[in-house]
Image (cartoon, helix red, strand yellow):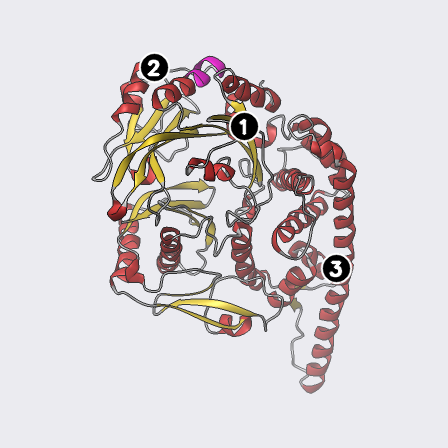
Amino acid sequence: MITSKELRDKWIKFYEERGHVNIGAVSLIGDGTTGVMFNVAGMQSLMPYLLGKKHPMGTKLCNVQGCVRTVDIESVGDATHFTFFEMMGNWSLGDYFKKEKTKWSFELLTEVFGFDKDKICSTVFEGNDAAPRDEETASYLKELGIKPENIFYLDKSNNWWELEGTVGTPCGPDNEWFYPRHDNPCCDKCDVNCDCGRYVEIGNDVYMQYKKLEGGKYAELENKNVDTGFGLDRLLLFLNGLDDGYKTDLFADTIAHLEKASGKVYGANASDTKAMRIIADHTRTAVMLIGDKNGIVPSNTGAGYILRRLLRRAIRYCKNLGVDATEMLGVAKIFIEKIYDEAYPLLVEKEDYILDEITKEIKKFEATLAAGLKEFDKCITGMERKNAFMKEKDPSYVPETQISGKQAFRLYDTFGYPLELTIELAEERGLTVDEKGFNEAFKAHQELSKAQAQAAKGGLTEQTEATIKYHTATHIMLAGLRKMFGTSTEQKGSNITEERLRFDFNCDHKMTPEELKTLEDFVNEVIEKKIDVVKTEEKYADAVKAGAYGVFNAESDDQIVSIYTIDGVDKQICGGPHVKNTGDLGKFIIKKEESSSSGVRRIKAILK
């Protein structure tokens, strides 16, 4: 079994032997220059150098960079989602190019990691009117021994990188590496384009060989760059033949700690397994954010709010697991002293500080729970008074025995009271809770939390003309999905780049070609109608009453929120930004519909 430390060492050693300088990892906390709260990709801090600035450490670089992505916090608890992960990267800044890079990636996969060259698959850019088919990369792959039938030519949305809405910036095709999980194809056409999950993307090499010109044209760059990214957590999982990320050495000891503390066995019960995963993942991310060189502490705003949310979710799941929340300290110590002591030595130096901050948050949340209990008692007292009053007026009156969804959500939103605790307390009083009403109120909270986690101008990792268009397109597409499948359809995840949108939503089946055509037509009809996108501001309660279904973690019903309305189509509470008119979007094309996780589908689409 290969360990995470061995994998890091192998990556760095491999590229140092080939003349690269290990530049180390930068802070996880955004510095305000990239428009995001956290470092979300290995190349994020290198963007100025990929755009032409001279790097002080040379032209051949490598590192292993920690990243934090919290857009899918609610998905953490399954076998593959994490809020902290690491990206292994290497870069050529005007130095080597395709021939060397394809050779090195191939050597790494076959000679270092032992992949069978006959099973390796690769995707390259298929070409379009603006840029030619990437036959150069394909020819190098064939020379290395990749079977021609294992090389796939894909379009711009899959194998091209550029900053939309800019001129004079580098861009170019990319080469993605895939490997099968097993040797049992689901059908005769089971390849990298199949959504059965058999093929896993191991990593990719981006070749920035062009400069963008006016009018969608491109010119060859004199100095060409390479940007490589391989996910450490994903590759570690794959190399060890596992399908559960919490069984690698990154989590094995923390899971064992939680098993011992709870007396329960990981994997034996879905609820307990989910709780262990959430406690382990959220504690790890908290350790990394507090122990960062630009470390943060829990608060009610910005990145500190995200940290607080992670810690309190972990604390809640400690209760679900039946362990004291202080067991999180034992989990944190394992990450600090055993798992990341070499890769992130600052964690060891700050250990006492990290543990103290986690302890303080545990105590604060316990106090919050006590305050929530007082509020819960007020709800019960109010209900009892109403029942007594109504019974006196009308002896046939049937007393209320249910706490409303709105009251339960207020306990959750204002006092941090988890629904399951409210239900437990209600049952002790012989009462029930309107769970459906709670879930309806929670939709808004959940979607906004995702937007806050993305923390970048309306959920965009970069605010450009292109990403703003894609953001608006996701609104229209969601409206179409809700029209087709009902208003219970909601966003489960979103990622917008310069060249495409990726949108996850709850759905119990694979969409048919007819359904995809209906959705595509719906979006394009809205675009063709050239409807103004109108922004208004009003009180949260009034917005919801008026039919706005978007989400906002309002501190009160009187809080002012922004509403974006596409007349007759969509009305959402959103931070924006959006285009002024749907006619600005161009043509909407769905490129792929696939499974994201159980009960969740994913759509990838582009605008032309």
Nearest to the observer: residue 291 or residue 315: 291
Q: Which mark is residue 428?
A: 3
Q: What residue type is disc 2 on?
A: Leu
Location of the N terminus (image quadrant): top right
Q: In the structure shown, which secondary structural element does the residue marked by tag 3 occupy?
A: helix
Q: Earlier in the sequence, mark 3 or mark 2?
A: 2
Q: Which mark is residue 117?
A: none
The answer to which image quadrant residue 392 occupies is bottom right
Residue 109 lies within the magenta run? yes
| Prevailing SS of the magenta stretch | helix
- Residue designated by label 1: 63
Residue 263 seen: no
- Residue designated by label 2: 144
Q: Is residue 81 left or right of residue 568?
A: right
10 Å neighbourhood of mark 3: few (<14), some, or many (≥20)?
Answer: few
| Magenta residues, start to end | 107-113
